[in-house]
Image (spheres, rainbow, N blue to C red):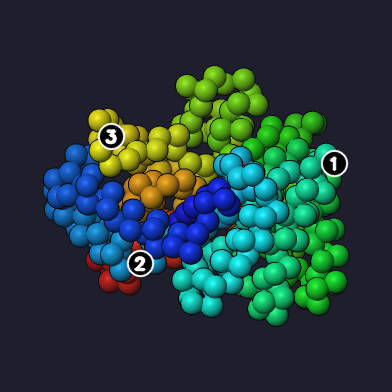
Amino acid sequence: MPMHTVYLGAERFARTTPRDLADGAAAFFDAAFPTPDAVARLGLDGPLSEKIHARVKACLEAGPVVQDLRLDFEDSYAGEDALVDANRSAELALELFGAGELPDGFGLRLPAMAESTAEHAFEILDHFARPLVDGLGRWPEGFVVALAKISSPREVHRLAAGLDQREVEWGLGPDTFQVELMAETPRSIYDSKGRLAVPTLLDAAPGRVVGVHFGVYDYTASLGVVGALQGPRHPACDVARSALQIGLAGSGVELSDGSSRRLPEIGDADLEDAATTVYADIRASLERGIYRGWDLSAPQIALRWLAVTAFFLEHVALANAETRALEDTSTRTALETLHHQGLESGVLTVEDLAS
């Protein structure tokens, strides 16, 4: 499982995007954390900070740094013509895919499937997906369609029905298109009768949903939280995350947390404070048992690698020692989860597990 999904306005997608993001993440890490002492200021002990610093630097240099990328035709889209950008993005994706330069995870985020926007959303999908299918003769494995602003199961069903139709028309197998659902409205957390909404949303697109992404800012705004107080650590977000985790338990569908509100840049006067805030936001999500999140910029990607690496290297040593002392099933299960998530994220090695 990738540790993150990077969201990028589709109008910004370019031939060099994956490399630019990777280079930017490495440059930010070198500027913000030039030495292990800088890492230690995040509250990590000396010897561990040296290991974390070396591990993150090596990962950012060796790559792949961007594990999952979504071209956004919704909130962060600032282009003039979404259909033109969808066609252009498809051509670039074909080129990058052929060169082996796309992340393993890739896809697009569509506008809502409400009646007023569904036609436009399907037009974007057609202008993006059909050229890919025609160029490759198939829909690439790992390519995902994310649906924004869900307020009812009808919208998820509308997307699923449209995908069913396109699979038949384009000669694709059933359930070829995988889907992510954006949980960013109150009715995507609890329905109008106070029941967990996500099981019904999954049932509206059976066999397709592989992920649910929690949208921090739309969700808190819909509850009346003022802008300055919106963020992933707001108490309202804890309630929503818990509901999503409960609703998804045992489903095999991954939960991804929303992004930090801070967007640090090299040269910022408050660089250390901004970097510490993003790091703490990511760590808080990991501590809640959510091992994947959004990133919106190269510096956030660097801080994702740092926070995830620190979290797993810290906790794998603690868990291994605890398991040697306690042999109960729950402890074993927790250790297996930790090992699996750490390996899947790409920050742990088999040698780390034996330490």
Cα gap from disc 1 to disc 3, whole angstroms: 43 Å
Residue found 17% across the figure and 44% down from its top = 38
- Neighbour class for label 1 at 10 Å: few (<14), some, many (≥20)? few
Residue 55, picture quadrant: bottom left
> Which of the two labelled residues, at mark 1 and mark 3, occupies the earlier sequence position?
1
Q: Quadrant of the C terminus?
A: bottom left
Residue 268 - label: 3
Cα gap from disc 2 to disc 3, whole angstroms: 26 Å
* Res 181 visible: no
> Which of the two labelled residues, at mark 1 and mark 2, occupies the earlier sequence position?
2
Q: Which residue is disc 2 drawn over?
A: 63
Nearer to us in this view, 92 or 233: 92
Query: Residue 64 placed where, x, y %?
Result: 39, 67
At mark 2, the secondary structure is loop
Nearer to us in this view, 184 or 350: 184
Q: For this view, does 71 lie left or right of residue 339?
A: right
Nearer to us in this view, 251 or 336: 251
Tally of numbered tags: 3
Q: For this view, does 118 lie left or right of residue 59?
A: right
Q: For this view, does 270 lie left or right of residue 200?
A: left
Q: Which residue is disc 1 drawn over?
A: 115
Q: Amino acid at mark 1?
A: Glu
Residue found 68% across the figure and 34% down from its top = 185
Q: Amino acid at mark 3?
A: Asp
Query: Residue 182 placed where, x, y %?
Result: 65, 45
Q: Say above or below: 174 vs 36.
A: below
Query: Residue 140 placed where, x, y %?
Result: 63, 73
At mark 3, the secondary structure is loop
> Which of the two labelled residues, at mark 2 and mark 3, occupies the earlier sequence position?
2
Q: For this view, does 266 lie left or right of residue 246?
A: left
